[in-house]
Image (cartoon, rainbow, N blue to C red):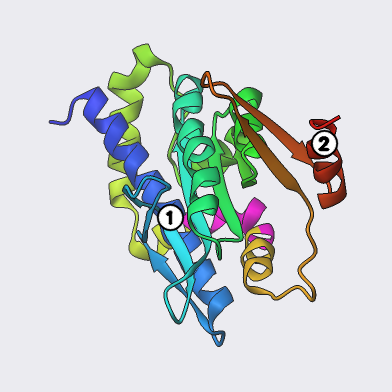
Amino acid sequence: MVDSYGAGRAFGQRLGKLIEDEIHRLAQDCLYGTEFEFLPKGQLTDLHGKLCTHDGLVVDREGRPYAVIESKVIQKAKHATEKAAKVAREHPDLKRAHLTLRSSIAVLAGDFTPEPLRMVEASGANLLFIPQGHLAAVCRDYGIGILWKDDEATTYAVAALDRYNTLSQDERKHLGQRILEPVAAELREVILAAITDVPGNPVVGVWVDVFFQRGEIEHHEFDSIEAALAYLQSWGE
């Protein structure tokens, strides 16, 4: 007999795997016939040489990364900040460590509150959000209830896991497709944009970090090279 905590955790993992699998299928379909491929559970080193595993990578024939994809699903808002923080923390550093990396993509589903979503957007990631209402409605169509309170987990978490386990492989595939449906078109666009060459590749922003002898660091962001140079020149005036 699975306890309520174990059932809730197991069901959440299965739901997350469904979304991952559908992202993988869609990404592979996007890249078919191109010089790029999708690597599920691909690994990249960060700025400090630490090897990190990601839900998926879009790489060229030489294995150079062009896009990194993460997906997170939650049923409770109390987990939102923890899940969003991983993307917000890791993805900017990955772009600095890998010069070919053009896009970081975060697919977040469930009870994410506004602040964690803003955190991910502020990191520069492409945020694709699937609201809790859509997630719950789709699961309900398959006889799975996901909106239970903590004190109801004994009944509802076990029931959700049991019902999921009765679904056929085709039903699970269709469930994953329907969950991802609100962001599927945008996900395709973002993946294709990451592998498309832009003539001239114009500069759209400049970051300047100023390191002081006592250890402080000032971070500044500019819309153009000229604005950044004007700021740096102002230090000598």
Q: Which mark is residue 20?
A: 1
- Classify residue 48 as left or right of residue 110: left
Residue displayed at 50% across by 45% down? 93
**Please, what is the three-letter code of the amino acid marked with disc 1?**
Glu
**Please, what is the three-letter code of the amino acid marked with disc 2?**
Tyr
Q: In which quarter of the image is the C terminus?
A: top right
| Other residues around mark 2 within 10 Å, as few (<14) / some (14–19) / many (≥20) | some
- Classify residue 201 as left or right of residue 141: right
- Classify residue 207 as left or right of residue 19: right
Tell me if residue 179 can be seen.
Answer: no
Task: Please say whether residue 55 is one of the residues in the magenta stretch.
Answer: no
Q: Is 129 situated above or below 40? A: above
Q: What element carries label 1?
A: helix
Residue displayed at 38% across by 15% down? 150
Q: Position of residue 53 (x, y in %)?
A: 34, 52
Q: Are marks 2 and 1 in contact (CB under 8 Å)?
A: no
Q: Distance between the residues labelled 2 and 1?
A: 44 Å
Q: Is 12 situated above or below 177? A: above
Q: Where is residue 33 in the image (x, y as percent from the top left)?
A: 55, 88
Query: Which residue reaches farthest bottom?
Result: 33
Q: In this rendered view, identify the residue nearer to me: 180 or 125.
A: 125
Residue displayed at 43% across by 60% down? 56
- The residue at which mark 2 appears reads as 231
- Classify residue 97 as left or right of residue 150: right
Task: Please say whether residue 182 is one of the residues in the magenta stretch.
Answer: yes
Q: Is mark 2 on a helix, strand or loop?
A: helix
Query: Which residue reaches farthest left?
Result: 1
Magenta stretch bounds: 175-186
